Image (cartoon, rainbow, N blue to C red):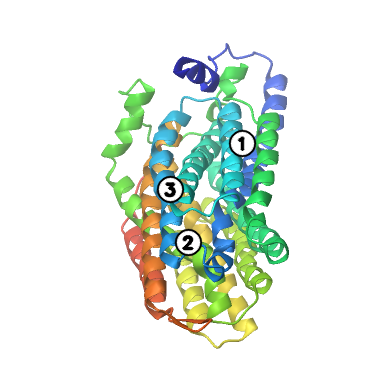
Amino acid sequence: MANALTRFFATGADLPVTADQATIDRLFRRHRFRVMLAITLGYGVIYTCRLALGVVKKPLIDEGIFTPVELGMIGSALYYAYAIGKLTNGFLADHANMRRFLAFAFLMTALCNFAMGLTTAVWTAVIIWGLNGWFQSFGAPGGVVAMTAWFSNRERGRAYGIWSTAHSLGEGLTFIGVGSVVAWLGWRSGFFVPALFGVLAAAGMYWLVRDRPRTMGLPTVNEWKQDFYAEKARPDIKSVLGLQLSILRIPAIWVLCLSAATIYVTRYAINSWGILYLQEDRGLSLPMAGTVLMISTMAGVAGAIAYGFISDKFFEARRPPVNLLFAVLEIGGLLLFFYGPNTMPVLIAGMVLFGLGLTGLVTSLGGLFAVDIAPKRVAGAAMGVIGIFSYIGAGIQEYVSGKLIQEGMTVAGDVRSYDFGPVIWFWIGASVLSMLLAATLWRTKLRD
């Protein structure tokens, strides 16, 4: 069985490069478009299978199915499994055929969501949601491996920025689309609808994505573009595994791990608990709370694209100055959102600033910066190392946030009241720490 799976996932052998330049140009143009379309739309759609729990938290609490602490446990299971899976599957992705790798994972995460809609047992939900996290962890390393195979060094910031809009696409589909369905049909539909999305995403991934250029008789994309960094990546290391392990000897990678972990605290705090906060503290309905959060995701589309464009065009692919700029936007948006006047224009303005800043930071700290400073042949491993820390941060956030929220919750008859003050400072403090850590990498060098 293991050998059959290995053969199924394995990347193809390199073929001799065709001598026809017109054919090379045509195939690159065709498959670059298909790959970018697939990893952006497909990853965006499959994101709904990860965020579904955040939409259904209030009905689950109100119906007495799960407490906030139990929901924190279930949510943490996804993030911890995702953290471990992103590391192991990141290393695996460097050896895999992305077409099969991603299609299989998307189908399995869809099945996990379907199963979640059928259970009300806490530990069953923990196990299923943990499995969902494991299969979700194929997505980001797989997408980045496909991207680095088909887009060259100095266009990668823009390509990564476009791909990062997938997060916002998935969040928008979840907060508005899934949220509206839940308000209409109940909490179970909050898992069944993403399951359907996941099946469609798996089919699209298998149809559109192709393996690395060398397996199709094409040169590498950097050879095709004649685009090389001045500093080469460890020419003394020949094996893929050796290159993967060399990542661990880059000090900047470890700083990035901590910076990513802390920004992911804030990122998933808003994704997981933002709707509950808007419903209970600001008095919004579920569809309206989803609409407010969707504004941040729409701003995030612009933020991801702007981050890649600004860092590539104005800073010659240097990320640290742009990290600082986007961190200021993100923290300013949080302060306005939580502490500004309780009016819709202020909430919207806070979400716009937050979405712009956060998505730019996730683009960089969550992967792009690591791919810049690591050997490109092992981009999946770089994503995996960053990913395990990112989602440990997200998992810690889920449990700590649930505990702080439950400790601030009081029940009088059928009425629940919440004190979100302590948990808000936990979320904002994580963003400030992330900004300070990222600023220490100001002079970090890039590699091929």
Percent of width and height locating residue 159: 59, 44
Asked whether residue 421 appears in the rendered view, the answer is yes
As drawn, the residue found furthest toward the bottom would be 341
Q: How many marks?
A: 3
Q: Which residue is at 43% across, 58% downward?
A: 264
Percent of width and height locating residue 416: 50, 80
Q: CA distance from mark 1 to mark 2?
A: 25 Å
Percent of width and height locating residue 210: 63, 27
What is the crowding at mark 3: few (fewer than 14 residues within 10 Å), some, or many (at least 20)? Answer: many
Q: Which residue is mark 3?
A: 369
Seen from the viewer's position, the closer of residues 68 and 398 is 68
Residue type at tag 3: Phe
Q: Is residue 440 left or right of residue 192?
A: left
Seen from the viewer's position, the closer of residues 277 and 10 is 277
Percent of width and height locating residue 430: 37, 66
Seen from the viewer's position, the closer of residues 276 and 317 is 276
Residue type at tag 2: Arg
Seen from the viewer's position, the closer of residues 273 and 367 is 273
Residue 411 against residue 204 in the figure, above or below: below
Label 1 or label 2, whichever comes before in sequence order: 1
Q: CA distance from mark 3 to mark 1?
A: 30 Å
Residue type at tag 1: Leu
Residue 205 against residue 331 in the figure, above or below: above
Secondary structure of the residue carrying tag 2 is helix
* Mark number, residue 107: 1
What is the crowding at mark 2: few (fewer than 14 residues within 10 Å), some, or many (at least 20)? Answer: many
Between label 3 and label 1, give the one nearer the viewer. Answer: 1
Q: Which residue is mark 2?
A: 267
Asked whether residue 375 appears in the rendered view, the answer is no
Label 3 or label 1, whichever comes before in sequence order: 1
Q: CA distance from mark 3 to mark 2?
A: 18 Å
Secondary structure of the residue carrying tag 3 is helix
